[in-house]
Image: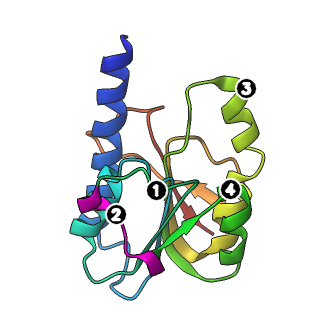
Amino acid sequence: MSRLDGFISRMKSQRAVLNHIKDQGMIGPDGVILEIGLGNGRTYDHIRELFPANRIIAFDRAIGSHPDSTPSEENIILGDIRETIQQFAGKNVAFAHADIGTAYPEKDAKTLTWLPQSMAAALMSGGIAASGLPLDHLDLEPLPLPADADPGRTYFYRKR
């Protein structure tokens, strides 16, 4: 599969999971959402459209998003995500989404030393996690992907 086809598959699968979460009513209107890795802001913008009543807090090292897809100052946390995400441990987050994989196995292996624990710690019981990297954690129960998502392109969990 070409890198372009892989990217399209990942984006299609990510959108399928996000839309499924909305369609199934898995997040209430009062729940806080974390977007871990703002990047260009495309996924943030989609989440904002799907969940307009929810507060969405985005994390990144620096702002690189399109101005139309940049959160307000009070809803973006800049710095090393491995460190900044720690402030949300025990905060009963409804949904956390992370797309911070690099496609470099050695770099992603380092991210996987802290990302699963950080997401599990932030989520409320029953909270939802979606990630471009697998989140191997005892508190995170894998959920079946919607039919239009490609396995291995995105991962989907509920906190026990």
- The residue beneath circle 4 is 80
Residues in magenta, as a range = 67-74
Label 4 crowd (10 A; few <14 / some 14-19 / many >=20): few
Residue 63, which numbered label? 1
Answer whether labels 2 and 1 touch (C-beta < 8 Å). yes
- The residue beneath circle 2 is 70
Residue 83 is left or right of residue 47, and the answer is right
The answer for how far apart the CA atoms under marks 1 and 4 are is: 12 Å
> Percent position (x, y) of residue 123?
60, 73
Q: Mark 3 is on which residue type?
A: Glu
> Percent position (x, y) of residue 1?
37, 11
Q: Is residue 70 magenta?
A: yes
> Which of the two labelled residues, at mark 3 and mark 4, occupies the earlier sequence position?
4
> Is label 3 or label 4 in front?
4
Q: Quadrant of residue 81?
A: bottom right
The residue at 36%/52% (across/down) is 65
Label 1 crowd (10 A; few <14 / some 14-19 / many >=20): some
The answer for how far apart the CA atoms under marks 2 and 1 are is: 8 Å
Q: Mark 4 is on which residue type?
A: Asp
> Which of the two labelled residues, at mark 1 and mark 3, occupies the earlier sequence position?
1
Residue 106, which numbered label? 3
